[in-house]
Structure formats: C-alpha cells, structure tokens
C-alpha cells in the first residue's frame, strides 16, 4: 500500500513539474501573452482609469501592431515614426488619448485614425514634419488636437478643407503657415484659422474667371460664325433660285399680262 501511494505521488509530481516547465517557457517565449502589453513598451493600469501603454523614446519606426485592445492612453512620443497608415489604431475602442509628438511624421494616410471618433478626446501631433493637412486622415474625429510646431503649407486646398474638419475648432489655430501658395499674400507665420482676411484661393478664382470668359467668347464666336454662314448660305440659295426662275420659258399671254402688270405698277 505505501508503494502504491509513492507511485501516485511520483506521477503527480512529474505532471506538476511538466506544467510548471510549460508555464516558464510561455513566459519567456510569449511575453505579450504573459504581460498583455505591447512588446518593448511599459503598461500600467489605474483603478477605474484603464490601461496606459508607454512606448516613448524607443526609436520605433512603425506603430506597434500588438497594442492591447483595452488601452485608454498610448504614448508614442520621441520615436522615429514617419507616417501613420490607414487603420493604424483600429481595434482600440476605448482609446481616449494618443500622443504622437516629437516624431518625424510627414504623412497621415486616409483613415489614419479611423475608428477612434467615438472615444478619442486628445490627439498630440506637435513637433513633427507635417506639411500638407489631409482632412481625410481625421475623418470622424472631434477630439482636441495639438498641431503646433509643424512646417504647415497653407494653400487653397487647406482653405477649402477647413469647413469640413470636425476637430475641436480651437485645435486648428495650431496650423501656422510656414509656407503658402501664393507666396506673396502674407500668410507666413500666421495662424491660418485666425487670418480672417486671408484668401489663398484668389488665384484659382481669377483663373476660373478667365477660363469662363474665354469659354463664353468661344461660344459667342461660334454663334456669330454660324449666323454669318447661315445668312450667306441662304442668300446664295435665294440668288440661285431667282436665276432659275428667270431661266424658265414664259408663255406669250403670261408675258403680256406680266408686262401689263409691270406697266400698271
């Protein structure tokens, strides 16, 4: 009987050792599964405040794809990111704060922040390399944004896009024109939203007006040409018809009557 008990204990000890060994392997081979945090980043949780993921100053060149879907705050500042691709943060329904400041961002693709509209309250894009404002990247966002310290280029496309941007209006004062088109309108160094008398579409409007005038002149010329052709063509037809009538043989009686009528007239 003691021998049976020893055998049972030995078997269970082996099973427990195998389970412990498997757990250790999973811990070392799958850190994300064990920590539930993006690899290389630091995660913390507040009571009732949700998860915070800090990936600051890691020299990242791409946005991590293994961000926990219960994340509420992400800090990706001071990295080497150059673009935000479409749907980069999709699958993060609770995300309320996103910090992308102090990177090398020069491109925000269409739908870069897609899916964050209902939850995101603050977006930091300051101190990057953003030149052209792409409104399609911010579709659905109503968050407060920090857009300062970027080499923004102000042109007619930006002016046309402004009324269709849903970001908090005060955020757009961070778009300070470093360059502009046309370059001689005094936009450099000016917060575009606050420059009420700045019209960067004036050149396009003038070009459109000239194009309309040229088009109208072309149509007018065509109408006049048609009228001249129509009059000349009908005059020539009338002349040929009259000559044809004169060439027809006439009856003597009819000729005498015509002479009488001519005399009376």
Image: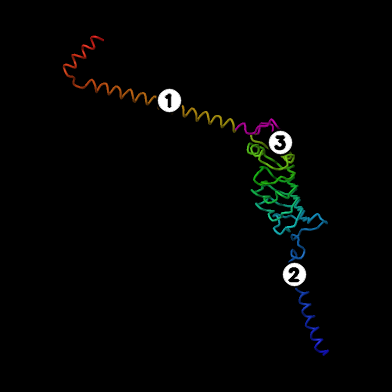
First-in-chain label (3 vs 1)? 3
Compared to residue 96, the image places residue 169 above or below, namely above
* Residue placed most toward the observer, 81 or 11: 11
Q: Quadrant of residue 250?
A: top left
- Dot 2 alpha-carbon crowd within 10 angstroms: few under 14, some 14 to 19, many 20 or more: some
Taking the spot 77% from the left edge, 71% from the top edge, the residue there is 23
Q: Quadrant of residue 13?
A: bottom right
Cβ–Cβ under 8 Å for marks 3 and 1: no
Q: Report the Cα–Cα distance between label 2 and label 3.
A: 54 Å
The part of the chain drawn in magenta is: 183-203
In the rendered image, residue 197, in percent from the top left (x then y), is placed at 69, 30
Which circle marks residue 224 in the picture?
A: 1
In the rendered image, residue 243, in percent from the top left (x then y), is placed at 25, 21
Image quarter (top left, top right, bottom left or bottom right) of the N terminus: bottom right
Element under disc 3: helix
Compared to residue 216, the image places residue 149 above or below, namely below
Cβ–Cβ under 8 Å for marks 2 and 3: no
Residue 87 in view: yes
Q: Report the Cα–Cα distance between label 2 and label 1.
A: 87 Å
Q: Which residue is mark 2?
A: 26
* Residue placed most toward the observer, 30 or 2: 2
SS assignment for the magenta stretch, majority: loop
Q: Report the Cα–Cα distance between label 3 and label 1.
A: 48 Å
In the rendered image, residue 179, in percent from the top left (x then y), is placed at 68, 37
First-in-chain label (2 vs 3)? 2
Which circle marks residue 193 in the picture?
A: 3
* Residue placed most toward the observer, 93 or 71: 93
Element under disc 2: helix
Q: Quadrant of residue 226?
A: top left
In the rendered image, residue 190, in percent from the top left (x then y), is placed at 72, 35
């Amino acid at each position: 009987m003691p021998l049976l008990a020893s055998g049972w204990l030995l078997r269970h000890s082996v099973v427990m050792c195998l389970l412990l060994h498997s757990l250790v392997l999973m811990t070392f081979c799958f850190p994300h599964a064990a920590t539930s945090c993006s690899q290389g980043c630091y995660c913390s949780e507040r009571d009732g405040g949700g998860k915070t993921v800090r990936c600051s100053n890691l020299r990242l060149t791409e946005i991590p794809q293994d961000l926990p879907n219960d994340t509420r705050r992400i800090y990706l500042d001071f990295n080497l990111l150059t673009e935000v691709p479409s749907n980069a943060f999709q699958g993060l329904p609770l995300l309320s704060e996103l910090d992308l400041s102090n990177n090398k961002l020069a491109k925000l693709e269409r739908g870069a922040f897609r899916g964050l509209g209902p939850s995101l309250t603050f977006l930091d894009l300051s101190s990057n390399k953003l030149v052209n404002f792409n409104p399609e990247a911010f579709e659905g966002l109503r968050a407060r944004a920090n857009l300062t310290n970027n080499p923004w280029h102000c042109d007619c496309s930006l002016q046309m896009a402004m009324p269709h941007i849903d970001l908090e209006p005060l955020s757009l004062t961070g778009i300070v024109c470093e360059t502009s088109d046309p370059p001689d309108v005094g936009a450099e160094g000016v917060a575009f939203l606050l420059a009420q008398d700045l019209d960067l579409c004036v050149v396009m409007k003038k070009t459109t007006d000239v194009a309309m005038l040229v088009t109208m002149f072309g149509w007018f010329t065509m109408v006049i040409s048609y009228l001249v052709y129509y009059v000349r063509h009908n005059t020539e037809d009338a002349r040929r018809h009259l000559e044809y009538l004169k060439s027809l043989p006439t009856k003597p009686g009819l000729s005498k009557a015509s002479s009488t009528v001519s005399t009376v007239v």
